[in-house]
Image (tube, rainbow, N blue to C red):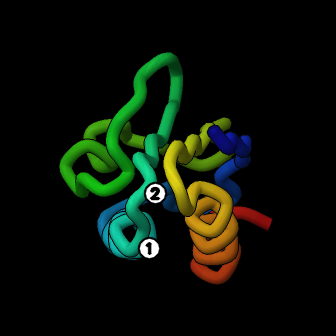
Amino acid sequence: MEKRDFTITSETGIHARPATILVQAASKYNADVTLSYEGKSVNLKSIMGVMSLGVGQNAQVTITANGDDEKDALDDIAATMKKEGLTD
């Protein structure tokens, strides 16, 4: 299992467009990928799950991947978050 913590720096947090892009990035991998925020965890491959967390600016989130390609999944998701301006 691979796990990484992130601070969301985007003023708008994880709203619909970046959430969709994160779901698409996670969905490319076989690993189970979860997004955790304030004690709740959701499947990062579920747009409704991600949106239900209401992740805002300065939020501390943890992304966990578990499976054959977990490291590749986390590397790609971390790069996607940086590219989309969600983290520094």
Q: CA distance from mark 1 to mark 2?
A: 14 Å
Instruction: Reply above or below: 18 against 71.
Output: below
Q: Residue at x 47, y 41 (%)?
A: 35
Q: Few, some or many C-alpha atoms within 10 Å of disc 1 (few <14, some 14-19, many ≥20)?
A: many
**Residue ranking furthest to the front:** 68
**Where's the C terminus, which quadrant?**
bottom right
* Closer to the camera in the image, 65 or 87: 65
**Residue ranking furthest to the bottom:** 83
Instruction: Reply above or below: 20 against 53.
Output: below
* Closer to the camera in the image, 3 or 36: 3
Residue type for callout 2: Ile
The residue that mark 1 highlights is 25
Res. 16 image quadrant: bottom left
Res. 9 image quadrant: bottom right
Query: How far across and how far down the image is residue 1, in percent?
Result: 63, 38
The residue that mark 2 highlights is 14
* Closer to the camera in the image, 70 or 51: 70
Q: Residue at x 58, y 44 (%)?
A: 63
The mark lying in front, picked from 1 and 2, is 1
Task: Tell me if 84 is positioned left or right of 31 in this view.
Answer: right
